[in-house]
Amino acid sequence: MKRILFFLLLVYPLTPAVTQQRMEEIFIKMPDDRIIQLGEAWRKDLVELYKSGKTATLENTMQGKSDLLKLTDDYLLLQSTERSTVEMKLLPLVNNTHIICMITTVSAPVADSRILFFTTDWLPLPADGLYTPVTADCFWKEDADHLSVEYLEAKARLDMSLIKYSLNVENTSLMAEYTTPLYLDEDSRDKVVSLLKEAPKKYEWKLGRFE
């Protein structure tokens, strides 16, 4: 956290409070390489369609369609391609400054996410100071018998770690869902799920970090 604060002091010198940008401005001005299939003109058109109450869908540069599904002052959800979404949230930090949390999720076919953080000018921030990635072990029931045949067989079936992260439009929480079991056939999945927690992991944004 101290490293993030130091970085922001370099970016935002000791001047009067920084004027908070709205999500629509941040989305329009984001670097093109962050969503390669939607240039600035496309993003601007999507925002204008959404604000006018029309269906915010456009053909993108990858010969597919992109849909702006939700837009508020501090939140955005974009169906960027048929198999991928982009979700963004403005998170409060210090001295009226905010940072961007951006989650890209790809379903191929099971959802897996990547989390990145930026200043509101789209300068990258080190993620390790802002959250600790969840691991697959977090989703196993605490009282599961780690020496049982059922447990060992279930662990052997899950040979990868896929996590779907999602933000909340109404608050600053972050959810992590273990999606690897969705790769399994129905019978194997049922045996694995019985050993897993039902609820996803929930993070809360506190003092400039997801805890």
Image: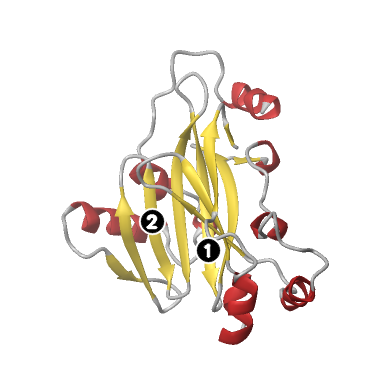
Q: Which is nearer the N-term, disc 1 or disc 2?
A: 2
Residue at x 52%, y 22% (from the top left corner): 94
Q: Position of residue 12 (x, y in %)?
A: 55, 23
Q: Position of residue 87 (x, y in %)?
A: 45, 54
Residue at x 56%, y 26% (from the top left corner): 207
**SS category of the residue bearing label 2:** strand
Q: Are marks 1 and 2 in contact (CB under 8 Å)?
A: no
The residue carrying pointer 2 sits among few (fewer than 14), some (14 to 19) or many (20 or more) residues within 10 Å by Cα, namely many
Give whichever of 163, 188 is nearer the camera. Answer: 188
Give left or right: position of 169 versus 55.
right
Give whichever of 71, 111 is nearer the camera. Answer: 111
Q: Which residue is mark 2?
A: 77
Q: Position of residue 130 (x, y in %)?
A: 63, 38
Q: Quadrant of the N terminus?
A: top right
Q: Is residue 128 above or below residue 153?
A: above
Residue at x 48%, y 69% (from the top left corner): 84
Image quadrant assignment for residue 60: bottom left
Q: What's the distance in space between the residues labelled 1 and 2, CA to CA?
A: 11 Å
Instruction: Please tell me the numbered disc located at residue 105.
Output: 1
Give whichever of 116, 113 is nearer the camera. Answer: 113
Name which residue type carries label 1.
Thr
> Would residue 185 be visible to someone looking at this image?
no
Image quadrant assignment for residue 144: bottom right
Name which residue type carries label 2.
Leu
Residue at x 42%, y 60% (from the top left corner): 39
Identify the residue at the far right of this view: 147
Q: Position of residue 88 (x, y in %)?
A: 45, 49
Q: Is residue 42 above or below residue 126?
A: below
Give left or right: position of 18 versus 189.
left
**SS category of the residue bearing label 1:** strand
The residue carrying pointer 1 sits among few (fewer than 14), some (14 to 19) or many (20 or more) residues within 10 Å by Cα, namely many
